[in-house]
Image (cartoon, helix red, strand yellow):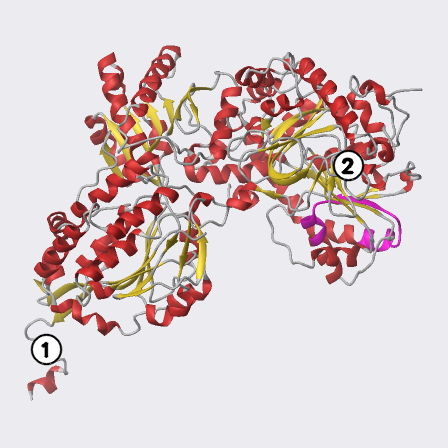
Amino acid sequence: MVEFRVPLIIRGKVIEDADLEFGGRGGAAKFSSPDVGKHVGELALSNPSRMADLYRLTLEEVFDYLDALADRLSFGQNPYLQEAYELSCRTSGLGPDILQYYYRMMPKQMASEGMREIARHAVGTEYLEGWVETKLDSGITANIRAFGARTVHVVAGNTPSVSTLTIARNCLTRGDAIIKTPSNDPLTAAAVARTMIDMAPDHPLTRHISVGYWKGGDTTVEEALYQPKNIEKIVAWGGMASIKHISKYIQPGIELVTLDPKLSSTIIGEEAFVDEPTMLKVAAALARDVGGMNQEGCVNARVVYAQSGTDKKGIERLNRFGQMVWDAVQALPSHVSGPAQRVDEELQEEIQALRLNGEDWHKVIGSGGKAGAVIVSQMDEPVDFARILANRVVNLVPIDDMDTPVGAVNTYTQTIGIYPESLKVELRDRLALQGTQRLVTLGHCLGMGNHGIQDAIEPLRRMCRWIVEERAAPGTEDVRAPALAAE
Amino acid sequence: MDTYSAGEVTDNWSPRPVDQSRFGTDPQSMIWQLRKDAFAIPPKEIAEIQLTALRGRFEELVQKIPVLKRLADEQGVTKINRIEDGAQILFKHSVYKSYPFSLIEKNRFDRLTAWLDNLTVYDLSGLDASRIETIDDWLDMLYRDAPIRIIHSTGTSGKLSFLPRGKIECDLNSRSFVLGFEWDTPLEGLEDIPMIVPQHRHGFSAYNAVQDAVVKFRFHGDESMLYALFPGRFSADILSLGGRLKAAESKGSLGRDAISPVLLARRDQFIKEQASAPEQRREFFRNITQKLRGRRVSMTGNWTMLYELSVEGLAAGSEGVFAPDSLLVTAGGTKGKVLPPDHKEVTKRFLGIDKFVEGYGMSETVGGLFQKCEHGHYHAPPHYVLYLLDPATGEPYPRTGTQTGRLGIIDLLAGTYWAGLLTGDEVTLTWDQPCPCGRTGAYLGSGIRRFSEKEGGDDKITCAGAPEAHDNALAFLSDFE
């Protein structure tokens, strides 16, 4: 039985046909959707000049619109968001309390206050507002403006915030967004778009958002849509398979902005082990990074390198610390973290196999399953299955010095939470060179400042088309040969 | 009447007189029973034999295999009271690869041996692996100095599983190979039927174990009766290196220091072998299409191997190369590859073999395949205790009717390691509805699939993930100057 209808929204128009059915994640929810293949012609904005309406707005009007939208995204009042929440409860790896927390955060996420700061730091407000004049040493005057682009956004569904963030970013950069939703969150972006339509059906910002679900890799949709005549950019979040199949459409004329699948880690210096109170404090901070958002994010801690020492005493210290981390994860409030929604069977089998080995190599605290586990390596190496750590399973690895954690960093390392601060400053150049993209105070991996930096790129700047109008240096306008020019 | 038990296995593949009343206490003798008789045991008797044998196996092995002991303790199983108790003590695939991968990278084969010691009844503590630097050498050492023969996995997941099968059980492979062809009379003249090997002759895959048993017992050591596509060795090191390259992507860079110098030194030999592969293939096809043309042969392989071989043979202009009554066993699915719908026809056209014995099985067992009957059912021989589990909860389903779930199996033949396995396969199992083919016992429907395949292809996107790169291990090796 189909329980949810996912609409196709094309620039203010809502299509609610139930042509196709899809099974939600975990086999828990089924949803129907129009056959996007039938509407590709309309979905593509083949004439980019139709974006001109966006440029009749001032940036202040954009911010006003975002504030009005924020008001309408109040979870208690918005039936679209409530429906998206209901569906997400069935498909998401986040439990109901955590999901609700994210839905309730949406007004704040959309409101102009934060978006102004993002505009300022991530792009430059004046470039979003108009042409910015710069005099160059050559005498050339450059007038530069950030224009929006026709962009397909392939969004991730591990948290509903990705959908709202994408819409907010599109408004700010004045693009024409086609949002391809994922099966684990097919409704959130549509819910926001419908709220925009109810609020201001003819507003240019409403008329430049389209949202649809099609199965990633559906060639009838993607081959027709992913053409340079239709789009300039694809912004793709996550999923190795998803990024790989999108990359085959990349050709001259289409730019891929990829927010690759990543994993994050943690480095804890010896200062954490000076006394019990400090160990407890650090364990609580680590628990936030491990368990927040149910470890569904790329920013969450998974492998933790701790300078406990690798001798017998050091391992014993780390085992004690592991128990503290376990206790702290289990004690996280329910809107931050909770039991796993779906237990990863492969991970579960690996944990069981480790336990059956005895404790020579690994000590497993907790049973795994819904509650999670802390795996304390009894040697200075992570478990072989580190890349699938999830369900609030964290691996603590004892180290003597910082060469091991630095060497383990590569281009797929996103965030590293570090304790103490001085160690972060000490290691930041080495870690950056090795490939990491973000270093944070331990316990703060889930917060993201409005600086606009993500995955070592500036996605908002990349979402823009940077246009320059150049005026030749004074006296060089006449390019005829000097003799002719003198006549 | 003579009975045969493990200690008395001699050089034969034929059925032997057995004492059915002793199956419970001597389960390994079950393999020697003529197939017609094995599949005529009434279900009630099968249940009794299995309960007695399982009880005995568990009591015998739980004291000698530490990993089984820990699992049993964890599950609170101290003895087998009911057949259902066995469902609590099935190993998952991960058990056979739960060693830290770094033991291989750091040449700690002594510790790898110690890990393996927890999985077999044999005492491996006296073995000296301290100077070993490659997996191939380790496998050879174990084969030489211990009563075991490792079966390693052939997957590309990055880490090989090592199953310590006893040699005594490997010897049963000469018997298990013919089970699919035998019914009411023993097979005659097998010594004169050459064997085709569509892969490497040597190595420690499950197929290699069958080949070795066949040469040893059927051909009495005569290697010339075996026609292998590649006469050399299927190197576990090369296989593992491919996995290591993949792991390096998510663990940090893999430099020269992570590759054993011994392996690097052997690089030229590997590359040379690879270079001679095309000539070996030509030689192989010359042999099978000329020397063996029209002859009755025996052969085993999975559909992918057989199909790829057949496409190549047909392209070279050969067709119907073997006698129609040749003995061909296929199992093992398609190993993740997608084959065209007509792959069976293409294979038949090239090989010229009328009838394939199709089976379902796994390397963790020794008792041969579940054989597919004319009604499309895979029949479990009575030495296999089956379990069907709820994939979500892991609880066993009742042992009646027809149900779909995750298959668990315990092979009662194995006496040197714990052959109780929770497979990753979704099967439809019929417990008590007799199949029209007349075989007694439980059977599986033909729709067998891996849970991982079922769950794959989903359109979930999250930002958390790590790379799964596939590189050519040899190309990588050859880059080292």
Q: Residue at x 39, y 44 (%)?
A: A91
Q: Residue at x 5, y 73 (%)?
A: A474
Mark 2–mark 1 Cα distance, whole angstroms, equals 85 Å
Which picture quadrant has residue B301?
A: top right
- Residue A411 seen: no
B402 left or right, relative to B157: right
Query: Helix, strand or loop at disc 1?
Result: loop
Q: Is residue A256 above or below residue B42?
A: below
Q: Is residue B290 magenta?
A: yes
The amino acid type found where label 2 is placed reads Gln
Residue A66 colored in magenta in the image: no
Q: Position of residue A165 (x, y in %)?
A: 24, 50
Q: Quadrant of residue A292?
A: top left
Pointers 2 and 1 within a single chain: no
**The furthest residue to the bottom:** A487
Where is residue A307 drawn, in percent x and y?
31, 20
What label sits on residue B211 in the rendered view?
2
State the mark number for residue A477.
Answer: 1
Whole-percent x and y of residue A140? 10, 68
Name above or below for residue A381 compared with residue B265.
above
Q: Residues within 10 Å of mark 2 (few under 14, many from 20)?
A: many
| Range of residues picked out in magenta | B286-307
Q: The numbered mark 1 sits on a residue in which chain?
A: A
Q: Is residue A317 left or right of residue B404?
A: left
- Residue B360: horizontal and vertical position, in percent? 70, 40
Q: Quadrant of the C terminus of chain A?
A: bottom left
> Quick one: B77 or B143, which is closer to the camera?
B77
